[in-house]
Image (cartoon, rainbow, N blue to C red):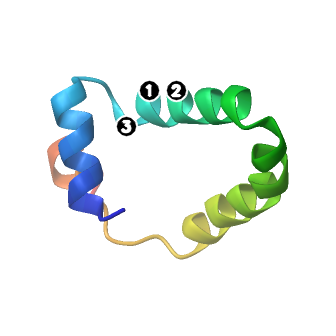
Amino acid sequence: MDSNDFRSIVESASVSDWTLIDAALTVASVDYPNEFKRRREGIVERIYTIMSVSPPCHDCVANNNA
């Protein structure tokens, strides 16, 4: 999914990124428990990879985190 598509979904749903991510993980784990377990390690690996090579912050200026 494209980053702008994700932002559009978050905006139209009127929820925070974190609320949407949490809900998506919950739904995936309940609706697809076996696939979720298979993908879990990859999800965690992706989180740590992204944290070590962070792209420019989308809202740093707005949140004064620049």
Q: Earlier in the sequence, mark 2 or mark 3?
A: 3
- Horizontal arrangement in the rendering, residue 10 relative to residue 17 (left or right): left
Q: Is residue 64 something one can see in this rendering?
A: no
Q: How many marks?
A: 3
Three-letter code, disc 3: Asp
Residue that label 3 marks: 17
SS category of the residue bearing label 3: helix
Tell me the residue at 18%/34% (across/down): 11
Q: Is residue 20 something one can see in this rendering?
A: yes
- Horizontal arrangement in the rendering, residue 51 relative to residue 35 (left or right): left
Tell me the residue at 76%/56% (across/down): 39
Q: Residues within 10 Å of mark 1 (few under 14, many from 20)?
A: few
Give the vertical position of 52 relative to 63 (above or below): below
SS category of the residue bearing label 1: helix
**In the image, residue 3 lies at what x, y percent?**
29, 61
Residue that label 2 marks: 23
**In the image, residue 6 lies at what x, y percent?**
29, 50
Three-letter code, disc 1: Thr
Residue that label 1 marks: 19
Q: Disc 1 vs disc 3: Cβ atoms closer than 8 Å?
A: yes
**Residue 42 position by quadrant:** bottom right
Question: Mark 2 and mark 3: span between their CA atoms?
Answer: 10 Å
